[in-house]
Amino acid sequence: MVTRREALQIIGGTVAGLVVGGVVGYYGGKLSAPSGPSGPSEKPKLKFGVLFPFTGGMAPLGAPEGWGAIEAIEMVNDRGGVLGNKVEYVVADSKSDPSTGASEAERLISVNGVTAIIGYFSSSIDMAVSEVCERHKVVSWGCGEVADKITQRGYKYVFRPHVSGGAFVTVTVDFLQKVIPDALGKKPGDITIAEFHEDGAWGTSIGNALKYMNDHLDEPFNIVLSEGYSSRATDFSSLLLKVKSVNPDIIINAGNPTDILIIAKQMRDLGVKTHVIIGHGSSWVTKPLYDTLGKDSNYILGNEPGDYPPGMKVEAFKPEVRPIIAEFERRYKEKHGVDPIPHAYIGFGNTWVFLNYVVKGALSKFGNAEPDSLVAAAQEVDIEPGEIPGLSYGLKFVPVGQTWKAPWGYTYTSGENMKEESMLWQWFDGKLKAVYPEKFAIADYVVPLPPSSPFAKT
């Protein structure tokens, strides 16, 4: 059994603490210390906080997301800034803790005087920090959080351009409908699904959306198990034995980085069998899964937005965007000694949009980057898929004071991205490749699991 400590070691190395003006981190590569510009601010004032889990349990994936955000700022500054104005930024560490994130947000706003905070990797941290931002009327720009609750509270200053939990399920259900019945030679009603998720805001979003969408299909699937679990647990054998007992055709999980790795190994050790595994959550689509299972990870499917350009069609991006992605990848590797992981693209792409669309729009129309100007400019952003470096989805927010009924049944208020979109990836000998939908795919999906997989039903 993989212990929580072992799982954290598998996910990545140690990420060390803050230094003046930046962070020191390590993700399988050399130490780096990005720092913001010093000296007096340019006029108009462009001063933003960069708040990510650079240390703590979330750091192995959260720190690269933060480094990606920092790289976007530095690339914009190297190009002369936003309309000739350099961006000043203050880096803070949430230490993978919502309470610390909230207190750091208070400091960034009250002491450092930022007009927006860019972050946060974690839904729980975003929920805490965005409360602080809304209270102070400062923009919260969430890069990689997915809990649906973030944008269901009617907040004016809170934005989440990244894909929400419910949007993840849309592509999963589409795949189930269009691929699985023919692949398994069964009608949807005869196909059994075991779904289990961590019981926080993220996992619950996936579980609820899956149930809602399945209930509204013309031919629903047979969900024989649907259960939440605590991601703080270190042993999931009782849950997995329950999964094994229902003998599902499809297993769907939504977890956090550590519990995913424990679950994956315990599924193999306990002899859990199925035809299809679809994982939602970072460790299903990053190297730690391969480090845990080796070749046994082959043909496991993971659901993740298009934030990993090497594994998806380059044609999914507009020609003018491709050189920006290449420059980011080069600079990131020079600084950190490794290629960017998917979360680095999330931080980079969403920060790039904030600076080059929202901040630029505020300066162009209002002559400043104060919170209300940023909110107004964000409401006018309308970006098509393929126009954001490193991210496949487009961007258009629900207007302030209005609502949007999403296909997965949830009603969102302002700050939700109505063009959010995810995709499915599959493991092939340690390589993650986009397989669905076809417009992003660079490989054909393999369904059902072949006999070579230890998870395959015979």
Image (cartoon, rainbow, N blue to C red):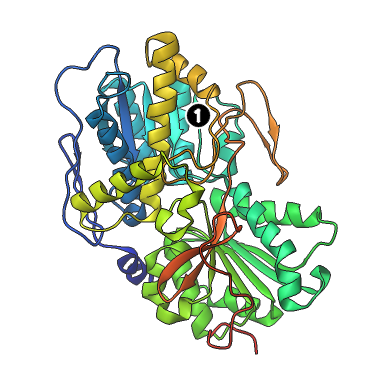
Residue 57 vs residue 19: left or right? right
Question: In this view of the protein, can residue 1 be seen by the observer?
Answer: no
Pick the quarter of the image with the C terminus: bottom right
Query: Does residue 307 lie above or below 357 as drawn?
Result: below
Residue 18 vs residue 234: left or right? left
Residue 103 percent coordinates (x, y) = 34, 33
When asked about the image quadrant of residue 288, the answer is bottom left
Q: For the point 58% across and 48% down, which residue is it?
A: 165
Q: For the point 48% across and 56% down, which residue is it?
A: 313
Query: Does residue 357 lie above or below 207 as drawn?
Result: above
Q: For the point 42% across and 53% down, which residue is it?
A: 309
Residue 315 percent coordinates (x, y) = 49, 50
Nearest the eye: 298 or 244 = 298
Q: For the point 62% across and 36% down, which residue is it?
A: 418
Question: In this view of the protein, can residue 203 be seen by the observer?
Answer: yes
Q: Name which residue type carries label 1.
A: Val
Q: Which residue is mark 1?
A: 158
Nearest the eye: 57 or 99 = 57
Seen as rendered, the residue at the extreme front is: 319
Q: Secondary structure at mark 1?
A: strand
Number of marks in the rendered image = 1
Residue 105 vs residue 411: left or right? left
Seen as rendered, the residue at the extreme top is: 366
Residue 444 percent coordinates (x, y) = 57, 69
- Report crowding for label 1: few under 14, some 14 to 19, many 20 or more residues within 10 A (C-alpha): many
Pick the quarter of the image with the N terminus: bottom left
Nearest the eye: 430 or 389 = 389
Residue 419 percent coordinates (x, y) = 60, 38
Nearest the eye: 226 or 340 = 340
